[in-house]
Image: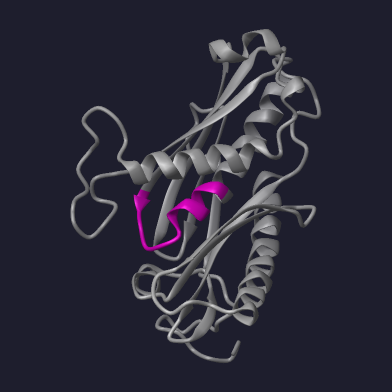
Amino acid sequence: MAKSKRIDGRRANELRPVTITPGFVGTADGSCLIEMGGTRVICTACIEPGVPRWRESAGLGWLTAEYGMLPASTSQRKRRPAIKPDGRGVEIQRLIGRVLRSVVNFEKLADNTIYLDCDVLEADGGTRTAAITGAQVALAMAVRKGVTAGRITRGALAGAVAAVSVGVVDGKVILDLCYEEDSRADVDMNIAMTNRGRFVELQGSSEGVPFDDEQLAEMIRLGKRGIKQLLRLQKEAIQ
């Protein structure tokens, strides 16, 4: 299965070319541009004093995320949300925040909130997983800056997390779907894992032909393989 060629020439178990450019936005506490094939996402992290009202008496910091797609990020112009993000955007930003919170020690953040912003420049599939992977880089850079400045305590990050898509297309399990593959996939799944090999999120569903145990096991295996590579690229980016 791994030897089968795909529309862009990749094997089933290959990621698209990945580039992470740290410090892409100089005014943020942490930032990067992550490029996975034709998908490009700017991720920034900003530390601001204060926490949500419901968090004030807990003695813990907070982390939240926002996600959006620029109007020209897709083949047809995407309208800007007039008042609030569309349903898909809300779902994705909740996912990003939930996943990144899994590696944060909130008692080390003091009375601060970290805001993660993920803005899609170009979308060619896997924008949510690219956003998670890039947001981890921005978060790590912001935490390091915050510790140096004495704004937060060392140990605020308990680890790292990355995410990737897997799926079943034409009966074959493949890693890191581009848009054309995603648009005709029988099964689409997103996997987020920590650098300790623990799952944070598994989002999968059949869009056509249901999948079996063997395909599920293969999707998880390929997802682990891809995430291991992404974690290594994250580490290289923030050194």
Q: Is residue 214 above or below residue 67?
A: below
Question: In which quadrant of the rendered image does the C terminus lie?
Answer: top right
Residue 231 falls left or right of residue 31: right
Residue at far top of view: 57
What colour scheme has been applied to the protein in the rendered image?
one colour
Q: Residue at x 52, y 54 (%)?
A: 129
Residue 112 falls left or right of residue 94: right
Q: Is residue 216 above or below residue 156?
A: below
In terms of depth relative to the viewer, which is nearer, 25 or 104? 104
Magenta residue span:
121-132
Q: Is residue 29 magenta?
A: no
Q: Is residue 77 above or below residue 156?
A: below
In terms of depth relative to the viewer, which is nearer, 50 or 235? 50
In terms of depth relative to the viewer, which is nearer, 59 or 212? 212
Q: Residue 17 location, x and y as percent?
A: 52, 68
Q: Residue at x 58, y 11 (%)?
A: 50
Count of numbered badges drawn on the protein: 0
Which quadrant holds residue 175?
A: bottom right
Q: Residue 172 location, x and y as percent?
A: 51, 85
Q: Residue at x 72, y 24 (%)?
A: 106
Residue 72 falls left or right of residue 124: left
Q: Is residue 122 magenta?
A: yes
Q: Residue 14 location, x and y as percent?
A: 58, 76
Q: Residue 231 location, x and y as percent?
A: 69, 56
Question: In which quadrant of the rendered image does the N terminus lie?
Answer: bottom right
